[in-house]
Image: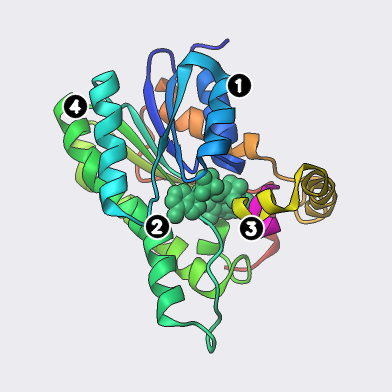
Amino acid sequence: MGERLKGRIAIITGGTSGIGEATAEVFVQEGAQVVIAGRSEERGKKIVERLGAHACFKYADVTQEEDISGLIQFTFERYGRIDCLFNNAGGRVEGNLETITMDNFLYGVKLLLGSVVFGMKHVAPIMKKQGSGCIINNSSIAAIRLNQGGYLYSAVKAAVTHITRIAGVELGPYGIRVNSISPGAIATPIFLGGSHVADSLGEEVQERKMGKLVVNLAKATPLPRAGLPRDIAYAAVYLASDEGSFVNCCDLVVDGGRTSLFRE
Ligand code: NAP
């Protein structure tokens, strides 16, 4: 067990699958106490069983402000402080230029941007009182290159990267660092249609599809392997630890060099 996050209290939204699940694992290995948030109680509880007393699960739908404030309140009441909030939950957003509907639009903005905005809104007062804190927002290389994600997804992730910088300037004087991570293509259930679609496939089919995905994604970057959830988890550990204590308003791109294959 490492000590890079020893004794720190962290919340990870979307901690029930993919990047969030891997981050919860690595945070616990580095000594943090982690609140895993998500909608899938079944997956959340299984992960907590595996990680032990250093993790707990709290249901939260990040499209609902009251769930976000409840999650932050729950964590503060239970542990007395919050050192890190990883706004990670997300998923695909349907619709292109001509097919987008108002419902898809509002859902996409709530899921990908509202989750970040309201997470920061409710955690900031607690971190300000502490005089310290670290917020990490999961963005995407779709925010900085074309054709790396869907139509609305890409635009909304660009807003996530930008609002991160704005918040980092506003909260920096209180000792709160706000950074984003922009993952490249990472092998997670998002490529199978999302965590809930993946659940419906059953374990065997899911494993087979993930195996194929890992092989295919290895062709997508200059490095000869797929991006894995742990690659993002280690970036989050760096940002949340003392090693990242002078890093603020930064967008950390973790993509095996994929963005360099495309023009800005
Ligand atoms: P994933 O395996 O499908 O996981 C998505 C997570 O988000 C799940 O834990 C899911 O929780 C949670 N989630 C989705 N909708 C939610 C809601 N309304 N309320 C609460 N939780 C919700 O996908 P992933 O690849 O790890 O994605 C994590 C983040 O990384 C997303 O923000 C995604 O945009 C970003 N990202 C991924 C990639 C990639 O290539 N994988 C690249 C760039 C950025 P439940 O299952 O419990 O509902």
Q: Mark 1: which amino acid? A: Arg
Q: CA distance from mark 4 to mark 2?
A: 24 Å
- Whether the residues at callouts 4 and 1 have beta carbons within 8 Å, the answer is no
- Whether the residues at callouts 3 and 1 have beta carbons within 8 Å, the answer is no
- Secondary structure at badge 2 equals helix
Q: Which residues are magenta?
A: 183-194
Provide the residue designation for mark 3: 259
Q: CA distance from mark 1 to mark 2?
A: 32 Å
Q: Nearer the viewer, residue 23 or 103?
A: 103
Q: CA distance from mark 3 to mark 4?
A: 36 Å
Provide the residue designation for mark 4: 131
Res. 139 in view: no
Q: Residue furthest bottom?
A: 98
Provide the residue designation for mark 2: 160
Res. 264 in view: yes
Residue drawn where x is 39% and y is 28% of the image: 10
Q: Nearer the viewer, residue 69 or 171?
A: 69
Single out the mark in the foreground, 3 or 1: 1
Residue 262: image quadrant is bottom right
- Up/down of 224 relative to 145, above or below: above
Label 4 beta carbon within 8 A of ligand 1? no
Numbered label attached to residue 234: none
Label 1 beta carbon within 8 A of ligand 1? no
- Tag 2 or tag 3, which sits nearer the N-term? 2
Q: Mark 2: which amino acid? A: Val
Provide the residue designation for mark 1: 50
Quarter of the rendering occupied by the C terminus: bottom right
Quarter of the rendering occupied by the N terminus: top right
Single out the mark in the foreground, 3 or 4: 4
Q: Mark 4: which amino acid? A: Gly
